[in-house]
Amino acid sequence: MNRRTLIKRMIIMLIAVAVVFGAIVGFNMFRAKMVQQFLTSQGMPPQTVTTMVAAYEDWQPQLSAIGTLRAVKGVDLSFEISGRVTQVNAKSGQEVKEGEVLIKLYDVDEVAKLRQLEAQAELARIQLARTQKQLQVAAVAQSQYDADFAASKSLEAQVAQQKALIVKKTLTAPFSGRVGIVTVNLGQYANPGDKMMSLQQLDPIFIDFYLPQQELGRLKPGQPVLARSDAYPDVGFVGRITAVDPRVDADSRNVHVEALFPNSEKRLVPGMYATVGVQTSGPVRHITLPQTSITVNPYGDTAFIVEEGKDAQGNATLTAKQVFVTLGPKRGDQVAILEGLQEGQTVVTSGQLKLKNGTPIAVNNTVQPANDPSPKPQE
């Protein structure tokens, strides 16, 4: 076989391979086109969503914050002087009255010295009276009377000083309230400043909280405040603002607010935290939706509304339309819509991640997303 024949056969083989390869590529392109035409003719399948009708609800404008409870009167009691504990009258959690004796230190020596000083002071008063009578008849010099007068006053001062010392060895309740945990024992030696027990007046009680400085113009004494604690999730406590600090914190730019709450049942105790809401005006009406209705995007908040129409055969259809919305305050699972929606429009509440403008939808409201203005923790 000569070289020319070999080249001819090679060319024929390459042409045959090219024809087969081109036929395969052409078939695949034709198949893809036909599939696309088929899907186009079938239309996009509807996406299942839940919906609700946009409606107005009443909202109570309020400022929210986290507050800390503080007793109107609360102290850690301690002695000014040292001594051995000889009497403990208070028990943990006991309610005590103002002036009630709580703890006493050993004071036998001090009482004995007081009796001695009182006897000396009485003798000095008698001596002073005698000297005064003698001075009236010029039986003694004025200097003697002055010396006796000074001695009498000095002993009276020593008696008062000794009484004050004995009083310091008795710890009494400075006001009525509830005693904390008592860990003092009989015979224990107490040093000056050692904490013996705490005493808290629980009714009424303060709640301290902080709000941004831009809210300062909306705050004033007497405004109602609603507080809730996770210790009592089903109970709301109502109080009123008693004071607004005239100074704004330079670091946080927040203003300190104090509110007073009745606490006759002693449910609230110092140190607890609570969520507080300050009512700033009367109720207002907003279109209200579940927060799941809103899609957050870098270019703005959006929602999908349901539009009704008909297809080429005259059958009713439902499609999604995306609209921009302006959000207002939030409460629980709900959000207020300030702009972008109208009352009566049907809004998609879940399933909108699969939607875009014109997407056909099917509504299934068997299971609705949470829409509770005051949700409670689930056990």
Image (cartoon, rainbow, N blue to C red):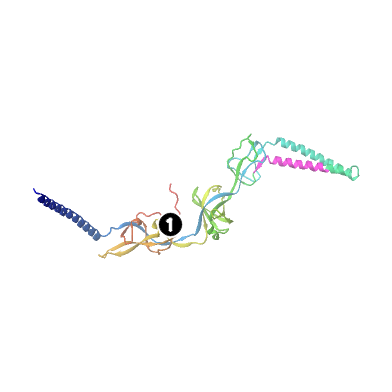
Q: Quadrant of residue 50?
A: bottom left
Q: Position of residue 252 (x, y in %)?
A: 53, 53
Residue that numbered label 1 is attached to: 334
Foreground of the two, 115 or 253: 253
Disc 1 secondary structure class: strand
Q: Is residue 25 visible?
A: yes
Foreground of the two, 14 or 185: 14
Q: Position of residue 210 (x, y in %)?
A: 54, 54
Predominant secondary structure, magenta span? helix
Q: Is residue 243 visible?
A: no
Q: Is residue 122 above or below residue 353?
A: above
Q: Is residue 324 above or below residue 155?
A: below
As drawn, is 280 to the left or to the right of 116? left
Residue at the limit of the structure toward the left, as seen here: 1
Taking the spot 79% from the left edge, 38% from the top edge, the residue there is: 120
Q: Position of residue 94 (x, y in %)?
A: 59, 42
Foreground of the two, 344 or 62: 62
Taking the spot 80% from the left edge, 43% from the top edge, the residue there is: 153
As drawn, is 152 to the left or to the right of 71? right
Taking the spot 52% from the left edge, 50% from the top edge, the residue there is: 274
Over which residues does the magenta segment extend? 149-172
Q: Please check the rendered image and state whether residue 171 is part of the magenta-colored stretch, yes or no.
A: yes
Amino acid type, residue under disc 1 in the picture: Gln
As drawn, is 17 to the left or to the right of 247? left
Q: Please check the rendered image and state whether residue 151 is part of the magenta-colored stretch, yes or no.
A: yes
Q: How many marks?
A: 1
Q: Position of residue 299 (x, y in %)?
A: 40, 60
